[in-house]
């Protein structure tokens, strides 16, 4: 806990609540993999939720607007505008989409920040349901490889590395896609390997390299 709180607080003060929540989720997943009882983790989560009413006044104004817009989109059309456009984009894509770079919502700029937070909506509009399922399948395959690495790791360190990266990939993917389909409040978390942004891509490639090293060293290497 002492190692978690300082970076989470500093990241939140940027302000970046989404990335702070990512760290908390990864920390919880690694604790579970290390053998901490689920009941203890549930108690921690319950305590955090119980503190939410006290934290609400300290949230940034735009964070409060996003949460309120998620609960009642009609109450603040401006705050929920991009989510509405994202849903229109995905719904209009149909089975096979409108074609690469032929999406009306994305190419005519009705959909904002389409290259990062809402890239999944662009995929849904231009490549359709087939493209969305392909992306989900590829992310699922990488996630399976990470969990497989955790299963065959020779030691606890390797297992925790693999579980941590799997948790990071799962949480960011689930939240980003959830935002695009309107089941999660807007957080500003990129879609791994796909959203524009060099730092995110480099981080995940570095993490994949660590996981592959865990797989490589599951057996003794002779030189």
Image (cartoon, rainbow, N blue to C red):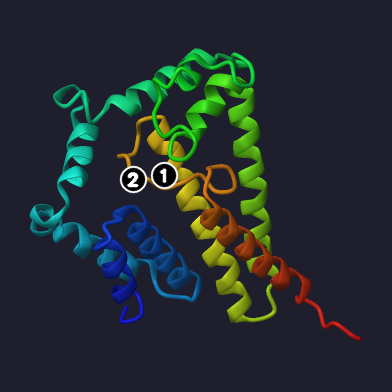
Asked whether the beta carbons under mark 2 and mark 1 sit within 8 Å of each other, the answer is yes
* Residue 52 higher or lower than 77, as above or below: below
Q: Nearer the viewer, residue 82 or 72?
A: 82
Residue pointed to by mark 2: 187
Quarter of the image where one finds residue 157? bottom right
**Residue sitting farthest toward the right:** 223
**Real-space Cα distance between discs 2 and 1?**
8 Å
Instruction: Locate residue 77 relative to residue 127 in the image: left or right.
Output: left
Q: Which image quarter holds the C terminus?
A: bottom right
* Residue 178 higher or lower than 47, as above or below: above
Q: Secondary structure at mark 2?
A: loop
**Residue 146, image x, y percentages:** 64, 60
Q: Nearer the viewer, residue 197 or 51?
A: 197
Q: Residue at x 11, y 57 (%)?
A: 58
Quarter of the image where one finds residue 159? bottom right
Q: Nearer the viewer, residue 33 or 213?
A: 213
Instruction: Locate residue 98 relative to residue 15 in the image: left or right.
Output: right
**Residue 121, image x, y percentages:** 48, 28
**Residue 120, image x, y percentages:** 51, 33
Instruction: Locate residue 19 relative to residue 106 in the image: left or right.
Output: left
Q: Bin the neighbour count of mark 2 within 10 Å (Cα to Cα): few under 14, some 14-19, many 20 and up.
A: some
Mark in the foreground, 2 or 1: 2
Residue pointed to by mark 1: 175
Which of marks 1 and 2 precedes in the sequence?
1
Task: In the rendered structure, find residue 31 and report the number of the disc placed on it.
Answer: none
Q: Residue at x 32, y 78 (%)?
A: 1
Q: Secondary structure at mark 1?
A: helix
């Amino acid at each position: 806990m002492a190692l978690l709180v300082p970076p989470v607080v500093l990241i939140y003060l940027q302000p970046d609540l989404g990335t702070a929540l990512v760290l908390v989720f990864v920390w919880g997943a690694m604790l579970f993999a290390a053998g901490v009882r689920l009941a203890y983790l549930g108690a921690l989560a319950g305590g955090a939720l119980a503190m939410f009413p006290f934290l609400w006044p300290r949230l940034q104004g735009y964070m409060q607007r996003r949460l309120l817009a998620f609960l009642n989109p009609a109450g603040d059309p401006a705050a929920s505008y991009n989510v509405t456009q994202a849903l229109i984009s995905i719904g209009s894509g149909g089975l096979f989409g409108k074609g690469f770079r032929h999406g009306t919502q994305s190419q005519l700029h009705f959909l904002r920040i389409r290259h990062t937070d809402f890239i999944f909506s662009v995929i849904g509009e231009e490549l359709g349901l087939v493209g969305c399922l392909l992306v989900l399948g590829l992310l699922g395959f990488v996630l399976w490889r990470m969990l497989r690495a955790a299963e065959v790791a020779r030691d606890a360190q390797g297992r925790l590395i693999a579980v941590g990266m799997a948790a990071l990939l799962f949480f960011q993917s689930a939240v980003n896609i959830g935002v695009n389909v309107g089941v999660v409040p807007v957080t500003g978390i990129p879609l791994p390997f796909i959203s524009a942004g060099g730092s995110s891509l480099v981080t995940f490639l570095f993490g994949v390299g660590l996981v592959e090293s865990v797989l490589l060293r599951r057996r003794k290497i002779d030189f």
